[in-house]
Structure formats: structure tokens, C-alpha cells
Image: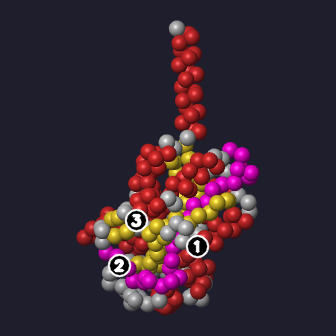
Amino acid sequence: MKKTLLTLGLSAVLASSLMAKDALMMATTTSTDNTGLLDYLAPKFEKDTGVTLKWVATGTGKALKMGGNCDVDILFVHAPASEKKFISTGYGVDRQQVMYNDFIVIGPKKDPATVNGMTPNEALQTIKDKSAKFFSRGDNSGTNKKELSLWNNAKVDTKEASSWYVQTGQGMLRTINMAAEKGGYTMTDRGTWIKYMSQKGESNTMKVVVEGDKSLFNQYSVVSINKEKCSNVKPELAKKFTNWVVSPETQKTIADFRLLGQALFIPNAGK
């Protein structure tokens, strides 16, 4: 009996070890999670490769920090300048672009600041001049980094902003909800906006007011963590995911991921 229990115990340990070996840990931005994209892709990845995908969704800044702390095997993020800087530290390798969408500024359907159709510079300057409420994630995410660069381009110093500029410290969906509740503006990626619209339906009080400018392009890429810097990471599993997500079959799967008849992300691996 003892021998049987011991055998069963060892088997459980070995099974657990094998499961851990075949689990890929990812740090990613909130938009790949909030939109449901990863829930859509993960079972397909496991079916195709036998590898379980686990992830933590946070801002890109925190995701990069997790990579630098050797807490994950791979990153799926959307702040190209920060990603390249991360690679220059030696912690990131094999960056490959996967897909894109665009950033948009949204606000109340009544558009109290009257910014509909303006360029990003014009809209942000007007929001500031009229002290219209603007809700920023304020969390060093890829979206927050882009938003701050747009304020800088518009020559508005948000560090000196008064009560009209609100930093939520929250993810994108929560920030949109706060802006909607308070009748303010915010910037989001289009995928999360489509997800928000699908949730709100006819009760949605927000609309897109700024879009289409080339500065609003939003690239998503994967970056593997360098085993020479982090001995605990699993580069072979990271490579499996990278190869899988940029493959023609998965790129089509991403293109087919839609809500309200709209594509949330546009695949562009190898382009």
C-alpha cells in the first residue's frame, strides 16, 4: 500500500513537472485580454502545439518590467520604442510584429468640447483650452505612452494639468467607463472600443471623435525573454508561440476575430 501511494505520489509530481514544462507564461497588454483575443487564441495554440498558454494582462510598462524581472517567458505588447529599448538591455530577443489596430479619441455623443473631426493636436489643445474632462490611464501602459506623446506633440504639459485631467490608474475598459460616467474624453485602442460597444449596446453614450491620423497607428509585437539573462525562462516554448502566432494560419485566425462585424486587429506579421 505504501509503495502504491509512493508511486502515485511520484507520478503526480512528474505529471505536475511535465505540465509546468509545457506551460508558457506571457505578460501582455490589457487590450489583448479585454477584447477576448487571447481567450480565442489560447485553446487553438494548445491544440496545435500541446503547450498551455498562461498570461498576466497589465500595462505594457509593467509587462516589460515583468520581463526584466524574469517573471515570464514572452511579452505580447504594443509600445515599439519601449520594446526596442528593452531589447537593447539584453533582456528581450526575437521581436516580431504580429498585428495592429489604431488609437482613437472618444467622448460623449454630445461632444461638449466640439472636437469631432479634428486632428489629434487640435482636439487635445481644444480639450485643454476648454478644460473638458479627459481621463488618462496614467499607468505607463502602451496606450498611456502613446497618449502622452500626443499631448507632447500638441504642446500641452499634462504635468501642469489641473482638475480637468484625471489619471485613473486603471485598465482601458474601466477608464472608458469612468469617462462615460463623468461625461469626459479618453483615448483607447479601437479593439477595446469595439468590445466596449458590444457590451453597452444601446446604452452606450460615447462616440469616436478623433481617428484616422497616421500618428494613431498601434503596432502589437511579441518579444521573447533572453535565457542568457533569465536562466529560468523557456525559450523553446516562446519560439513555438512566436512561430505559431506569425504563421499564415494564425494570422488568418486573428483576422477572423470580430465583434459587431468589425475586425479588432489586423494581422501584419512579416510586413
**Label 3, label 1: how many angstroms apart (C-alpha)?**
26 Å
Sequence-wise, the earlier of marks 1 and 2 is 1
Which of marks 3 and 2 precedes in the sequence?
A: 2
Q: How many marks?
A: 3
Residue 46 percent location from the top left of the image: 46, 45
* Range of residues picked out in magenta: 205-232
Q: Which one is nearer the viewer's eye here, 223 or 110?
A: 223
* Quarter placement of the C terminus: bottom right
Label 3 neighbourhood size at 10 Å, few (<14), some (14-19), many (20+)? Answer: some
Quick one: which residue is furthest to the left in this view? 202
Residue at left 74%, top 51%?
Answer: 228
Asked if disc 1 and disc 2 are in contact, CB closer than 8 Å, the reply is: no
Q: Amino acid at mark 1?
A: Lys
State left or right for residue 155 relative to residue 53: right
Label ID, residue 207: 2
Residue 88 x, y percent position in the rendering: 73, 65
In the image, residue 107 sits, relative to residue 32, either above or below, namely below
* Residue in the foreground of this view, choosing between 46 and 26: 46
In the image, residue 163 lies at what x, y percent?
51, 79
Q: Earlier in the sequence, mark 3 or mark 1?
A: 1
Residue on which disc 3 sits: 255
Residue 145, disc: 1
Marks 2 and 3, how far apart in space? Answer: 24 Å
* Secondary structure category for the residue under label 1: helix
